[in-house]
Image (tube, rainbow, N blue to C red):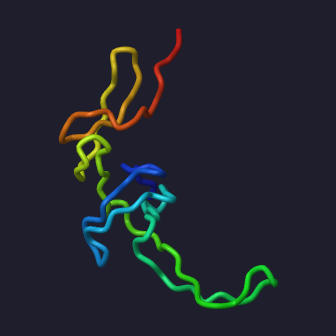
Amino acid sequence: MASKIHVKKDDKVVVISGKDAGAQGQVLKTEPKSGRVVVSGVNMIKKHQKMVSQNKPSGIIEKEGTIDASNVMLVCPKCGKATRVGMRIAEDGAKYRVCKKCQADIDLVKKAKEE
């Protein structure tokens, strides 16, 4: 089931549930089909890597695992608080993501149509 994700790549988020609750990080990757995101420094997993070539030696590497998008909240760049995301359509037809707490524009989602 495809679901909409309320965060985008490079957004600053805070984890609200799970073993890493309270941790902040940047969204590195989103997976809209599964509804999951990868956040820097959160949900670290260990992978046992075989040597493929001289450039990639064997060993145990740590990397970020995915977490469900419902377990993260966007941190507003203006007020600095974890917030839900709303949408606002400007008079010229442009669509913006909006902070629900301070009503500040977060970013532009869709430009206005040129006529």
Question: Which quadrant would residue 76 be assigned to in this image?
Answer: top left
Q: Is residue 42 above or below residue 2?
A: below
Q: Is residue 68 above or below residue 76?
A: below
| Image coords of residue 37 (percent x, y) | 44, 62
Q: Nearer the viewer, residue 73 or 77?
A: 77
Q: Residue drawn 69% across and 90% down? A: 58
Q: Nearer the viewer, residue 32 or 15?
A: 15
Where does the N terminus fall, quadrant-wise? bottom left
Question: Which quadrant would residue 40 be assigned to in this image?
Answer: bottom left
| Image coords of residue 43 (percent x, y) | 41, 75
Q: Residue drawn 37% across and 66% down? A: 68
Q: Is residue 95 left or right of residue 71?
A: right
Q: Residue furthest left?
A: 101
Q: Is residue 84 above or below residue 96?
A: below
Number of marks in picture: 0
| Image coords of residue 105 (percent x, y) | 32, 33
Q: Residue furthest top?
A: 115
Q: Is residue 94 left or right of residue 76?
A: right
Q: Nearer the viewer, residue 3 or 71?
A: 71
| Image coords of residue 73 (percent x, y) | 29, 56
Q: Is residue 36 left or right of residue 78?
A: right
